[in-house]
Image (cartoon, helix red, strand yellow):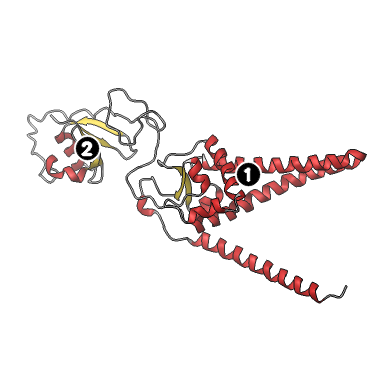
Amino acid sequence: MTQWYYADRQRQQQGPLTGPELAALFRAGQVDATTLVWHEGLAGWQPLSASRDELELDAPPPTLDFRTAPEPPAAPEPVVALAPGAAGYSPYAAPAAAMAMAQAGPVLGGEVVMAGFWKRVAAYLIDSMVVGVIGGIIGMMLGMLIIPLAAIGGDGGAYALIGAQIAIQLISIAIYAAYYAFFHSSSSQATLGKMAVGIKVVRTDGTRISLLRGIGRYFASLLSGLILGIGFLMAAFTERKQGLHDILCDTLVVDKWAYTDHPEWQRRELGTVAIVVLVLYGLLLAVVAVALVAMIGMLSTMHW
């Protein structure tokens, strides 16, 4: 008899069951037409609706003779998938005899909406403001501590100031690296800016990136900026909206609902937060440009 398996609402495999047992679960509302099922001989997991005729889901339930009705079958023991990251891991891998306890992983098979260039710009502007404020406060505190010591140092004060500047720059880089790596490798898979605009960072297979990969991705992003920003601009033209640092680190920036149970909730449009951020920064740049033009005009009319 064919042995059936299905993926429950927690994306864990259950089974084996006979066909009538699976049909009974369907009639009881414990599974529905979209539940993914598999049995030996199928090329892959498929919705239960594809096996409607085979399982006779539309047939009326059998009439029981309560005088001789057998005891209901015991609930099948759960069979769970390999943990993400384990060799041979797949969210819907065919059941095996011995399997490890499952962990939450990406839901594959749905549409994946890549984050557009301007969404990423809006997220970067928010993150730059957040980290800039944090770095500014720490830099000010270090300056208040180091500058008086440098003044007391006499002839060595200049070297102390240079050393202080180097230390502040290194601390600033460390803050940025820690911020991006921590948030990108967290359960949200997104920095505060990315959360605000509704995007996240994942591996190209949809899994969460590690902390070390997050650190590497930050330093790779410095390379994207060093080549005149071309590495960032690549996100506007590559097929999967990847910047140079994404390509180097095997990452994607996608909608926050990608690789989840609700891929239909993904949004292709910019969104209110992204639009507001881009407009505000655009107005700020316009004000700065006007001020610079006015200053240049004023200086050109002065007689020295």
Of all residues, the one furthest to the right in this rendering is 154
Q: Which residue is mark 1?
A: 176
Residue in front for this viewpoint, 5 or 232: 232
- At horizontal 67% and vertical 68% (from top left) the residue drawn is 289
- At horizontal 8% and vertical 39% (from top left) the residue drawn is 63
Of all residues, the one furthest to the top in this rendering is 98
Position of residue 87 measured from the top left corner of the image (x, y, whole percent): 38, 28
Mark closest to the chain's N terminus, 2 or 1? 2
Position of 215 compared to 41: left or right? right
Position of 206 compared to 215: left or right? left
Quarter of the figure with the N terminus: top left
> Crowding near pointer 1: few (<14 within 10 Å), some, many (20+)?
many
Amino acid at circle 1? Tyr
Position of residue 40 measured from the top left corner of the image (x, y, whole percent): 19, 32
Q: Which residue is mark 2?
A: 43
Quarter of the figure with the C terminus: bottom right
Figure check: 271 above or below 165? below
Q: Which mark is residue 265?
A: none
Position of residue 77 measured from the top left corner of the image (x, y, whole percent): 27, 27
Figure check: 40 above or below 294? above
Residue 153 visible somewhere in the drawing: no
Asked where in the image residue 205 lies, by quadrant, the reply is top left
